[in-house]
Image: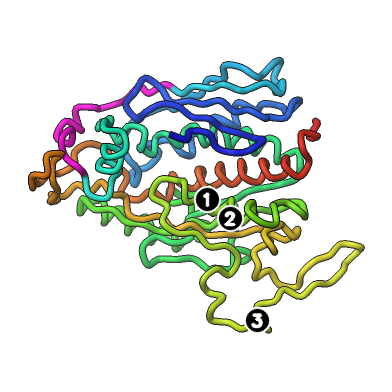
Amino acid sequence: MRNTFGNLFTLTTFGESHGPAVGGVVDGMPAGIDIDMEFIQNELNRRRPGQSKITTSRNEADKVELLSGVFEGKSTGCPIGFVVHNTNQHSKDYNNMRDLFRPSHADFTYTSKYGIRDHRGGGRSSARITISRCVGGALAKLVLRQLGVSITAYTSQVGNIEVSRDYSTLDFAEIERNPVRCPDPEKARLMEELISDVKKDGDTIGGIITCVVKGCPVGVGEPEFGKLHAMLGASMLGINAAKGFEYGEGFDCVNSRGSKQNDVFYSENGKVCTRTNHSGGIQGGISNGEDIYFRTAFKPVATILQEQQTIDKEGNATTFCAQGRHDPCVLPRAVPIVEAMTAMTILDYIMINNGTSLRF
C-alpha cells in the first residue's frame, strides 16, 4: 500500500477512522520556517466534523500535536512527526456492516485486495484520514507564504446551483462567512438550503470545488511525465469522493476555436504576460506565471440513510440501512483538503525546480 505523497516534500500518513489516532510524517520541510501552530490548527478546524448543521455531527476537536522537527518555533529541516487522536468514535454504528459490502464504498475492493478490512467507519478508506493531508498542506502553505504563493479554494457548485465560472468577479472574503464555503452569498444560501433538504431525505448530493493559485513562479512542472497539471489532477483525484478534474477552460474549450482559445503574449515592464488565461496558468505542463485555476468534481457521499440492496461477503443478497453520523455533502469540508493537496503539490515541484536550495 502506497502511503507516501510527494517527491522532495513528502507526506507519509497512518491511522484509521476508528483507531486510536491518525497522523503522519512530513519530510523535506525547509529549515527556518516559522511554525504557526494557530494557523495549522485553524486549517484542521476548517476540515473538522461538527462545524455546522450541514456536516456530520461527529464531535472531534482534531487537536494536532507536533512531535519532532521544530525547535524554538522554527522548522529544523528534520522530519516533522504529528498526531491527532480520535476521541469520539461510535464504532457500534457500523456493526450491521461488518459482513456486507456497502454500495459504492471500498468494502468490496479492500476485501478483495487484502482479504481483511476494518468495517468501522471505512477504516483506512475513511475521509477522516485526510486530517494528515491538512496538516501537511498547512506546513506547505507556511513555506509558500514566504515565496508569495497563495492558494484559495471554494465551493463553486452544489447540485445544479453554481456560481460564476469567472473567479475574478467573486469576493473571496465571503468564502469563510458561510458554512458552504461559497464566495457568492446568495448562491451560498441556496446551496445550504439544498443540502439541508437532501439531509432530511436521508440522501446526499455532490458538487464542484474551484481552486485558484496566485503567485506561482514561472517554470514549475516537468515537460513530460511530471506535467504540473497532471500532478495537480492526480492530487485532486486522490481525495475521497473526487470524480473529475479540469484546469483552465477545461471541457468548455471544445466549444471554442483556437483563434479564441490561444493566450496571446505581451511584455510589460520586462515581464512576459498573457492577455487571456484560457490555459489556466500552465502551458506544456509548466507554469507560465499567470493564475493557475482548476475545478474538481465530487460525487454524492456514498453513505445514505436509506435502505439499500447489496450482498454479504458470502454473496447472499441482503438489505441494510446505514446508521450513525455522516455528511450529506462533502463539499464544505473538502475545500481545505483541496487547498492542502494543492499546496503540497506546488511546493514539491518548486523544490524540484530548485533542488534542495530553498533556505529561509
In the drawing, what numbered circle is on residue 162? Answer: none
* Amino acid marked by disc 2: Ala
Q: Compute the Cα span from label 2 to label 1.
A: 6 Å
Residue for point 52% across, 53% down: 154
Q: Position of residue 29 (x, y in %)?
A: 68, 29
> How does the figure colour the protein chain or chains?
rainbow
Cα–Cα span, label 1 and label 3 = 27 Å
Nearer-the-camera pick, 292 or 158 = 292
Name above or below for residue 205 compared with residue 26: below
Q: Which residue is mark 2?
A: 230
Q: Splitting the image into 4 quarters, where does residue 357 fall?
A: top right
Look at the image and give the residue range highlighted in magenta.
Answer: 85-101
Residue 155 drawn above or below residue 34: below
Comes first in the chain, label 3 or label 2: 2
Residue 174 appears in the rendering: no
**Residue 321 relative to residue 221: left or right:** left
The answer to whether residue 169 is above or below residue 100 is: below
Query: Which residue is tagged 1?
Result: 234
Left or right? Give the position of 226 relative to 153. right
Residue 240 sits in which quadrant?
Answer: top left
Quarter residue 130 falls in: top left
Residue at 88% across / 67% down in the picture?
268
Q: Is residue 238 magenta?
A: no
Horizontal side of 292 relative to 306 (left or right) equals right
Q: Position of residue 318 (x, y in %)?
A: 8, 46
For the residue carrying disc 1, how many other residues have a C-alpha within 10 Å: few (<14), some (14-19), or many (20+)?
Answer: some
Q: Nearer the viewer, residue 110 or 104?
A: 110
The answer for how far apart the CA atoms under marks 3 and 2 are is: 22 Å
**The stretch drawn in magenta includes residue 97:** yes
